[in-house]
Image (cartoon, rainbow, N blue to C red):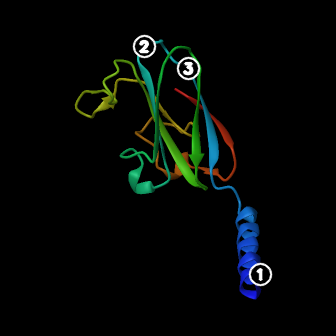
Amino acid sequence: MNKLSVVFVLLFSLNFILAQEPNNAHNLQITVTNFENLKGSLIVCLTDKKEDFLKQCEYQKVVAVTNATISLDIANIKNGTYSISLFHDQNNNGVLDTKGFFGIPSEPYAFSNNPSTTFGPPSFEKCTFLINENTQISIEL
């Protein structure tokens, strides 16, 4: 009986400790504005690694463009510092189309924090924001 009491106390303590840990799964609501037309899809890439920025996505979402403003949610995001890159894939080919020798994008694109893109894509750091709770952000194309 004594061993059973010890096991019960340990299980109860473990359950109490786990219940006190912060929730590390959050929702991100993204609102994207200024679509020029209602063709194609919006492709959103969320990453928390500098080396993955503009290359890979930890979380990716693709939604049809049906309004000049689109809101979308990404669920179950762990705590961290993230950056978003996105583009309006007007022809639904899954890639950001470019033109000319320098590869200038021919489809609208944007980043979290709405940094200037006059001299090329911004750095990961210019686009970062913290997720440690449910978060809402707005991005202009």
Point out residue 27 in the picture as x, y percentages from the top left corner.
Answer: 63, 42
Q: Nearer the viewer, mark 1 or mark 2?
A: 1
Q: Is residue 106 above or below residue 1?
A: above
Q: Residues within 10 Å of mark 3 (few under 14, many from 20)?
A: few
Residue indicated by mark 2: 39
Q: CA distance from mark 3 to mark 2?
A: 13 Å
| Residue closest to the far left | 101
Residue 34's disc number: 3
Dots 1 and 2: beta carbons under 8 Å?
no
Is 19 positioned to the left or the right of 68 in the image? right
Of helix, strand and loop, which one carries label 1? Answer: helix
**Of 72 and 75, which appears nearest the observer?**
75
Is 46 positioned to the left or the right of 70 in the image? left
**Of 100 and 111, which appears nearest the observer?**
111
Please tell me which of labels 1 and 2 falls first in the chain: 1
Please tell me which of labels 3 and 2 falls first in the chain: 3
**Of 51 and 24, which appears nearest the observer?**
24
Point out residue 81 in the picture as x, y percentages from the top left corner.
Answer: 57, 54
Of helix, strand and loop, which one carries label 2? Answer: loop
Q: CA distance from mark 3 to mark 1?
A: 64 Å
Q: Residue at x 69, y 49 (%)?
A: 133
Indicate the amino acid at tag 2. Lys
| Residue closest to the far front | 1
Indicate the amino acid at tag 3. Asn
Point out residue 132 in the picture as x, y percentages from the top left corner.
Answer: 67, 53
Q: Nearer the viewer, mark 3 or mark 2?
A: 2
| Residue closest to the far bottom | 2
Q: Residue at x 70, y 66 (%)?
A: 18
**Of 134 and 107, which appears nearest the observer?**
134
Residue indicated by mark 1: 5
